[in-house]
Amino acid sequence: MSGSDVTRDGLRGGRPGREAPTGARAGRRRRRRGRGEQPMVPEAEFSSYYGKPVLNKPTWKALDIAGYLYLGGLAGASSLLAAGGSLSGRPGLARPAKLGAAGAISLSLVALVHDLGRPARFLHMLRVFKPTSPMSVGSWLLVGYAPLAMASAAADVAGRYRLAGSAATAGAAVLGPAVATYTAVLLSDTAVPSWHEGYRQLPYVFAGSAASAASGLALAAAPAGQAGPARRMAALGAALELGAFRLMKGRLGLAAEPYDTGRPHRLLRAAEALTAGGAALAVLSGRVRDRRLALAAGAALLSGSAALRFGVFQAGVDSAEDPKYTVVPQRERLAARGG
């Protein structure tokens, strides 16, 4: 371009309007002049290369893994009730708790292996012990806890080997809290936004949910006169579960949105109603000594705990599918650091 190509009126030979600004800025200018044109460039949308999500959503099967989360919690908390029943001279409470722990952990292992596809894959996870890996620690926890829970139940049913049975009951009770809550650490250790952002409160949510489920099973199976510890555990577990979950959602920011939409929302609302109602019925059943109330409380608490695990699982899958739950918090953290 030579100097003579530029005049006071612009480029000589240039076509008017070809260099006009575009987008929302241009639209605002034109609207001021009364023309009312719309922006030429659409608002930015969250997307990724070739339409693929930013994160690969979890490939775990919902029935297997959410069931594994639920059954593991039920088993771990039941072992605590079993030990308490044994120490306080409540065999009618201790036996169903021991059987529940053994049955739940067995089904939990079946669900895990079914999701893995082959039993050998579970055995491969035992080749090393890595303290920084929740999956590795959890695998070894299951290997240590499951035989203890089964031995405790078998000794109680057989009525023999009482010393060994008592030792197994105590060992299962020691490992029970870790079995009930390590799955929360496992979920929080992933990049899934609605799981990872709740890493501080999710273990408490799962602990309360496990206590609610175990107390529900005991209330349904134990005699009313020996179910006092189960009723107290139901009240404490429900308070911990509901309180920690509300606190978690309040601190999640945008990542809390999947918990309040669609199927997760329906499941979690049902979990809240069932858990609160079950705890109230559990306390009431201790005052009126009505077996029907105890059965209703047990069913509500077991169902509420299951609904919570499935709701949390589905909310995490939904948050991984939408890129905004990954991109927006990252931008907010970057902006905060820059500020």
Image (cartoon, grey):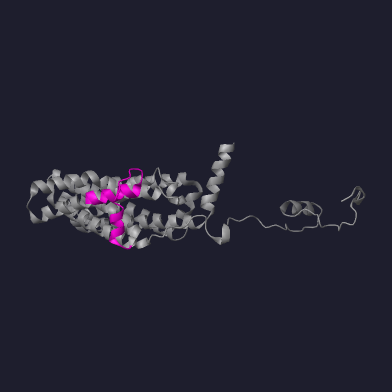
State the image coordinates of residue 214 (x, y, percent, origin top left).
Answer: 25, 52
Picture quarter with the C terminus: top right
Magenta range is 117-145
Q: Is residue 5 left or right of residue 253?
A: right
| Residue displayed at 50% across by 46% down | 253
State the image coordinates of residue 154 (x, y, percent, origin top left).
Answer: 13, 55
| Residue displayed at 8% across by 48% down | 162
Of residues 134 and 314, the one drawn nearer to the viewer in this rendering: 134
State the image coordinates of residue 313 (x, y, percent, origin top left).
Answer: 39, 56
| Residue displayed at 42% across by 44% down | 247
Query: Residue 24: within the magenta?
Result: no
Of residues 100 and 269, the one drawn nearer to the viewer in this rendering: 100
Q: Is residue 76 left or right of residue 225?
A: right
Query: Residue 133: within the magenta?
Result: yes
Q: Is residue 24 left or right of residue 53?
A: right
Q: Is residue 314 left or right of residue 90?
A: right
State the image coordinates of residue 302 (x, y, percent, origin top left).
Answer: 29, 56
Does residue 148 show up?
yes
| Residue displayed at 22% across by 43% down | 174
State whether residue 181 is above or below residue 47.
above
Residue 309: image quadrant is bottom left
State whether residue 272 is above or below residue 247.
below
